[in-house]
Image (cartoon, rainbow, N blue to C red):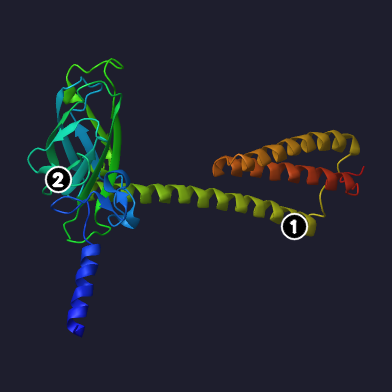
Amino acid sequence: MSRRFSVLLVATLALMLAAPVLGNSQGPPWLHNDRIVVEEGCSCHGAGGAPSSEVILSISGVPRVYETGQTYDMVISLAHQSYVSGGYMIWDYEAGNFTPGEGSKYVPDSGGALSHNDIGNDWEIQWTAPAEDTGDAHFSLAGNIVDLSGAPDAGDHWTLLTFTVNAPDTATADADVSLRTISVGDYESLFGQKSPEEIEAEKQAEIADEYFVQGNLYFWTTLSILIVAAVIQGEFYERRFGGGPPHLDMRLALPQGIRRGVLTLGMAIAFGWAVDTALPWGYTLVILMCLLWGVFGVYRTVVQARAVENPSDMV
C-alpha cells in the first residue's frame, strides 16, 4: 500500500467519524457513539457538545390525552436568532405509529422513529395512537440547528425535548389539539436581541449612571475628609495659639460625658449593623461621620475636664 493511499484512507475515515449527526442533510443515524441520538443528543455539535438554550425546539398538535386509533397531525419547528436550517428526530418508544410527511423519513433500525430527510426548520408529520389503551405514551424529540459550515462545530446548537401524552380517560382533552404547542428553549435569546442603537443607548446610560454614582462617592467622601481635617486643624491651632481647651467643671463634664458616651455607643452599634447588612454606602458614611463626631465629643469632654482651670476674669 502506497504512502499516498494510506494518507488518503486515514483522512477519509477521520472525515467520516467527524460527520454531523443531527445536522446531516439526509438525517441522523439512530446511534452515535453507542448512544441513542434522540435521547442523548450529539456530543460533536455545539460548544463542548452540550445542549443549548439558544435553539427553540417546539412541536404543535400534541394531544393532552390520546384516543385509541386516532391520527394526529403534528408540526415540528426549529428557531434560532442567527440560523434557520437544521434537523430533528422523534421517537414514541413504539407506543403508536408515525407517518412521515414531506422532508421526513423513518430512521433505520429504530423501531419507528422519524427524522428529517432534508434540512429545514418545519416538518409536518402524523402520529397514530395505539389501537388500544396501552397507558401513557412517552416521546423524545431532538432538534439541531446548524451554521451550514459543513462541520459539526460550536456554531451548531441542539437541544432535547421530552413529553408525555396521557392515556385515554386520564385527562381532559383539548377542544382544539392544533393549538397546543410544547417547546423548550430560551425565548429571550430569540426575541430579546437589541438593535445597535438600543445597545449604544444603554451603554451611554450606564456610563452616565456610573459618573453620577462615582461623583457622589468622591464628593461626599472628600467632604467628610475635609471636615475631619478641619477638626484636627482646629485642635492643633487651639493648643498652639489658644492655650489649650478651656476648663470644664466636673459637675458639667460628668453628665455631658455620659450623654455623649451613650450616643457614641449607639452610633457604634448602628455602624456595625450597617456594615454587616451591606447598607448603601451613603447611609453608612453618614453613620460613620456621626460616630466620629460622637467620639470627638467624648474626647473634648475628657480633655476639658482635665484642663487646668484658668479664670479669665479676675476682679
| Residue at x 20%, y 26% (from the top left corner) | 129
| Residue at x 17%, y 22% (from the top left corner) | 69
Report which quarter residue 171 is drawn in.
top left
Q: Quadrant of the N terminus?
A: bottom left
Q: Secondary structure at mark 2?
A: strand
Q: Residue 270: x, y in percent? A: 67, 37
Report which quarter residue 38 is drawn in.
top left
Contact flag, marks 1 and 2 (Cβ < 8 Å): no
Please state which amino acid type lies under the numbered disc 2.
Answer: His
Q: Residue 33: x, y in percent? A: 31, 56
- Mark closer to the chain start, 1 or 2: 2
Single out the mark in the foreground, 1 or 2.
2
Q: Quadrant of the C terminus?
A: top right
Q: Residue 132: x, y in percent? A: 23, 21
Q: Is residue 198 visible?
A: yes
Is 131 drawn above or below residue 259 in the view shown?
A: above
Q: Nearer the viewer, residue 98 or 231?
A: 98
Residue tagged by mark 2? Answer: 116
Q: Residue furthest left?
A: 102
Residue tagged by mark 1? Answer: 236
* Mark 1 vs mark 2, CA separation in Å: 87 Å
Q: Nearer the viewer, residue 276 or 69?
A: 69
Is 89 drawn above or below residue 178 in the view shown?
A: below
Q: Residue 75: x, y in percent? A: 15, 34
Q: Is residue 195 visible?
A: no
